[in-house]
Amino acid sequence: MIDLHSHTDQSDGSLSARELVAAAAEAKLEALAITDHDTFAGYDLAVPYAAEAGLDLVCGIELSTKYGRQSVHLLGYFLNQGPSEEFRAWITALQRSRHSRNQQLVDLLRSKGFEITLEEVYRRGGNLPGRPHFAAILVEKGYVPTLQRAFDDYLDASASCYVQREEPAFAEGVHRIASAGGLPSLAHPGRVSRELPILKEIVRDMQTMGLQGIEVFHSDHTIQDVESYRSFAQQFSLAVTGGSDFHGSTKPGVALGTGIHGTLNVPREVLLLLRRFSIT
Ligand code: AMP
Ligand code: ZN
Ligand code: FE
Ligand code: FE
């Protein structure tokens, strides 16, 4: 079993890079990709621990991009060589937009009467806090009972305290990843649309923009989803990717490797094919 979608505490996961590598070894994973949001910091930290543990570690990233008016997550896998310095510099620039969004979000929440400070958010979220850290603080302070309620009532794109973040266009994300030597793959396609015919047209369009892969296996996917996305992969000659989207205690109930009900099981062959795909 392998897992090609996971997060460390360098983005919004709860485990450190070292702890995540230990958890992967514990789960007997044959390979692990770290795909933090907008940062390689977790992957970089994990490299020596993975070498020590004999774990096949894959360098990845998950970017939030804009496809039309929708925010779409795009995975990038760097299978043969690390990302170029140019790409790393671009990522650093993206991080600045997150910091300024965080400042605006604190200001907005405070103006609505919530006691929350930027210092608290960074204490909680480390270098690159995201909305899940805001949600955790709102729960901890008793403003909402659960993380999900924090999103539903305040933080979700449709909720009252949403602050838009500058995000690169989907096409730019795809091109940047590909020209940095990576393989761009659409993350959890079901979040783009639950309507299969609509999703199919979107995936077709994304493929013409240079998309090379699609996340067929994911904790949120039903057996039917897996079959649908696998058939999209075949129809549009896309590589198949998959993983749990493990976040530790930030997303309780999602286990590394096996997902939500222990039903996820990404075969090692997926990575072998990906590596072959990205050579040609
Ligand atoms: P950010 O990158 O800081 O805007 O935060 C995005 C992260 O917040 C996503 O990767 C999800 O983990 C989480 N998130 C966004 N919207 C929701 C939602 N409606 N319910 C639960 N979690 C969400
Ligand atoms: Zn996340
Ligand atoms: Fe995602
Ligand atoms: Fe993710």
Image (cartoon, rainbow, N blue to C red):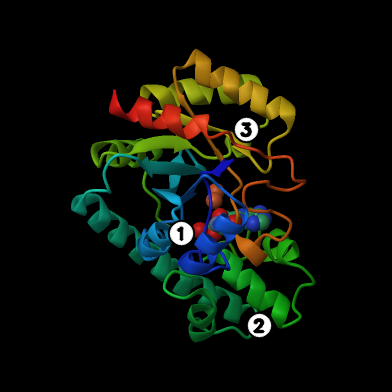
Looking at the rendered structure, the secondary structure element under dot 1 is helix
Query: Label 3, on which residue?
Result: 193
Secondary element under disc 2, as helix, strand or loop, is loop
**Image coordinates for residue 83, horizontal then vertical, percent:** 27, 48
Q: Nearer the viewer, mark 1 or mark 2?
A: 1
Whole-number angstrom distance, CA of label 3 to CA of label 1: 39 Å
**16 horizontally vs 182: left or right:** right
Mark 2 highlights which residue? 113
Badge 2 crowding class, 10 Å Cα cut-off, few under 14, some 14 to 19, many 20 or more, is few
Q: Which is nearer the N-term, disc 3 or disc 2?
A: 2
Q: Residue at x 58, y 22 (%)?
A: 230
Please say whether residue 84 is visible from this viewpoint. yes
Residue 257: x and y in percent read: 62, 47
Residue in the image at 61% along x and 35% along y: 217
The residue nearer to you, when weighing 167 against 17, is 17
- Among the 4 quarters of the image, the one containing residue 208: top left
Mark 3 or mark 2, whichever is nearer to me: 3
The C terminus, quarter of image: top left
Please identify the quadrant where the N terminus is shown. top right
Could you tell me which residue is drawn at 63 percent across and 35 percent down?
A: 190
Kindly identify the amino acid type of the residue bearing the numbered disc 2.
Gly
Q: N-terminal of the two: label 1 or label 2?
A: 1
Q: Are marks 3 and 2 in contact (CB under 8 Å)?
A: no
Q: Quadrant of ligand 1?
A: bottom right
Dot label at residue 53: 1
